[in-house]
Image: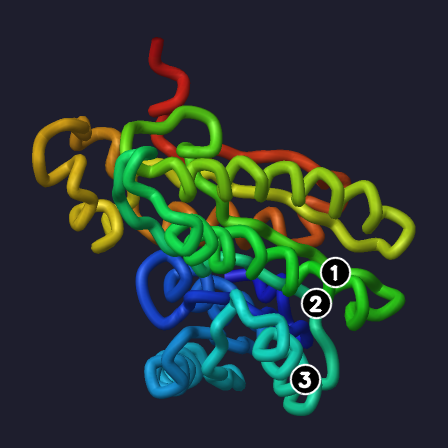
Amino acid sequence: MTKRFAGRTAIVTGAASGIGAAIAARLAEEGAGIVIADLRAENAAAAADAIAAAHGIVAIGVGCDVGDEAQVESCVEAAIARFGRIDVIVNNAGLMTFKTLAEWTPDDWLKVLRVDLLGAAYFTRQAFLHMGEAGGAIVNIASVHAIETSANAAPYAAAKAAMLSLTRTSSIEGRDRRIRANAVLPGAIDTPMLWDNPNIKSGAETIDPRDVGQPEDVAAAVAFLASDDARFITGTTLAVDGGRLAKL
């Protein structure tokens, strides 16, 4: 496989498992040094050790609550201390909980928004502060829920929709800094987040097996958008959903 990220460093949030782990593995396979940022430091460290051993690259794990700006700053400092640079940030960490609109409290809303929106905003700020003259790439992992959603997931859908707006603004402000920003919209991906969804479990929402993708499908899209192959692509949104959003 072409080493499109040789000599470069990527931070992937929420990367100890699921889609984030697949993204980190794909970037590592293509030569990137990897920083796995995850809520639990021990999980991040274990995932980093596994990726380093599997792909022969340097990887570190950092415990990071992405909704805490001080922890985001510390994560970036750790990345620079180890690698001396940051070239790619993938904002993947996400939280999805389920209540009706009448049941949501202010704290419930803020719990989701902190992770799903502010986490991406904090890491974007760090990208603008620390990516060098060569610039870099930000890839935000949104969701098809940003476009079409279902009941009982209002904060998640709202945060992911706002993430698309953040991506557009980042692409505009990043242009003179040579920082590109794009978003990916995963559909139904074979992870615990999908199968633990109470709407799926109850049958309120049905999934055609042909619409279920793998984490590696998302990782391939992220690797493209983060690479120089996508050097003229910024401010765009790429659905990785098997055509689910295209259905009438």
Furthest-left residue in view? 202
Q: Return the x and y of residue 70 as percentages of the image width and height.
A: 62, 78
Kind of residue indicated by mark 2: Asp
Where on the picture, by quarter, is residue 207?
top left
Instruction: Give the residue at mark 1.
Output: 136
Q: Residue at x 84, y 54 (%)?
A: 178
Q: Is residue 58 left or right of residue 73?
A: left
Q: Secondary structure at mark 2?
A: loop
User: For the point 67% across and 72% down, which residue is it?
Assistant: 8
For marks 3 and 1 on the same chain, the one whose residue lies earlier in the sequence: 3
Task: Answer with mark 2 or mark 3, whichever residue precedes in sequence.
Answer: 3
Give, as a three-letter code, the residue at label 1: Gly
Question: Of discs 3 and 1, which sits in the foreground?
Answer: 3
Q: Circle 2 sits on which residue?
A: 87
Q: Is residue 115 above or below residue 171?
A: below
Q: Position of residue 7 (x, y in %)?
A: 68, 76
Looking at the image, residue 215 sits to the left or right of residue 48; the answer is: left
Q: Which residue is mark 3?
A: 77
Q: Give yes or no for contact between labels 2 and 1 (Cβ–Cβ under 8 Å).
A: yes
Mark 3 → mark 1, Cα distance in angstroms: 17 Å
Query: Does 152 appear above or below 29?
Result: above
In three-dimensional space, the C-alpha distance between marks 2 and 3, rounded to whole angstroms, equals 14 Å
The structure's colour scheme is rainbow
Q: Residue 150, located in which quarter of the rendered image?
A: top left
Q: Where is residue 120 shown, x and y percent of the image? A: 59, 57
What residue sits 14% from the left and 27% below the top? 204
Q: Badge 2 local density, few (<14 within 10 Å), some, or many (20+)?
A: many
Location of the C terminus by quadrant is: top left
